[in-house]
Image (cartoon, rainbow, N blue to C red):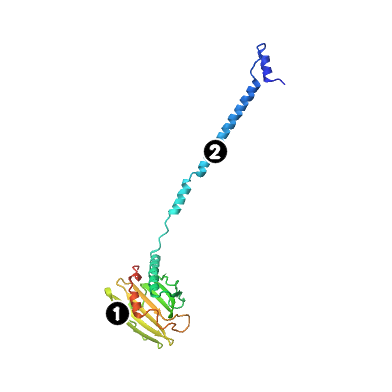
Amino acid sequence: MNTHRERLDREIGALPPSTIDIDALIVGQRRQVRLRKAGLGGLVMALVLAVGAVLVFLPRSGGMQWDRQVATSPSPPLDPRQAEAARLTAAWQQLVSQAFPGATLGKVPPTTLNERPGEPLVFVDLGTHFEAAAVVTDAQGTGTIKVSVGKEDSQFRNERACMTDPAPLDVRFSCEVVDAPGGEKIMRVTTEIGFEDFKRYLVEIIRADGNAVSIDVSNGVLENDQPYRGRRPQPLLTLDQATAMVQERSLGTTLP
């Protein structure tokens, strides 16, 4: 097979033989072309990889902005009545812990003082008022305490006077209304029910803004159809202690 150099020699005739290695030159040129192509391809590949790396490590404005928004998004505000129930709960728990240090608290049975009792000492929103209750057990025995804050539809709110209806035969009932500072009125009720020494003190104050606070304490727990039975010598608070506690300003509310 003729080489490129032999064909070139035939074309130029008697001229001195060429000292240029045409085949090597062509091979070299082809190698350079391949290298340039390979270099261009490598460069393109390098650029692709570099751009890809930048895209991988560069924070995405949309995603990062969303992350920042999620991280700094504030919690939705509580409903005003939910916030008030939480505030009352904190205030009431502090008062009870001071009055009964070391006592054990339990949930009031649903058939006793209210229809929707919450957890011990946690206020429940009943629409017109807030209410909390607990069964309290200490060294003297077990009793029940309930507090109501707001515009509960009570006999005292309606009449500003003690109940005058005759008490049932097995109930011994006494009541008085006394003045409090600022023109407020306080009703103090003592009730003894049944023949097993069950006693209750109910103290209610009507505040100047029309809201009321009442505290009901007993020396037992009312359970279903069980008889009224005392489980400690006296109610959890004395009548004077309940009167002082019902005037605590932290138990007031300004909500309608």
Residue nearest the viewer, comparing 176 with 87:
87
Q: Residues within 10 Å of mark 2 (few under 14, many from 20)?
A: few
Residue 176 located left or right of residue 104: left
Residue nearest the viewer, comparing 121 with 16:
16
In the image, what residue occupies the spot 35% across and 81% down? 189
In the image, what residue occupies the spot 55% across and 34% down? 43
- Per the image, label 1 sits on a secondary structure element best described as strand
When asked about the image quadrant of residue 114, the answer is bottom left
Q: Residue furthest right?
A: 1
In the image, what residue occupies the spot 66% across and 22% down? 23
In the image, what residue occupies the spot 33% across and 76% down? 244
Q: Position of residue 33 (x, y in %)?
A: 60, 27
Q: Which residue is mark 1?
A: 178
Residue 128 visible, this orientation? no
Quadrant of the image containing the C terminus: bottom left
- In primary-sequence order, the first of circles 1 and 2 is 2
- Per the image, label 2 sits on a secondary structure element best described as helix
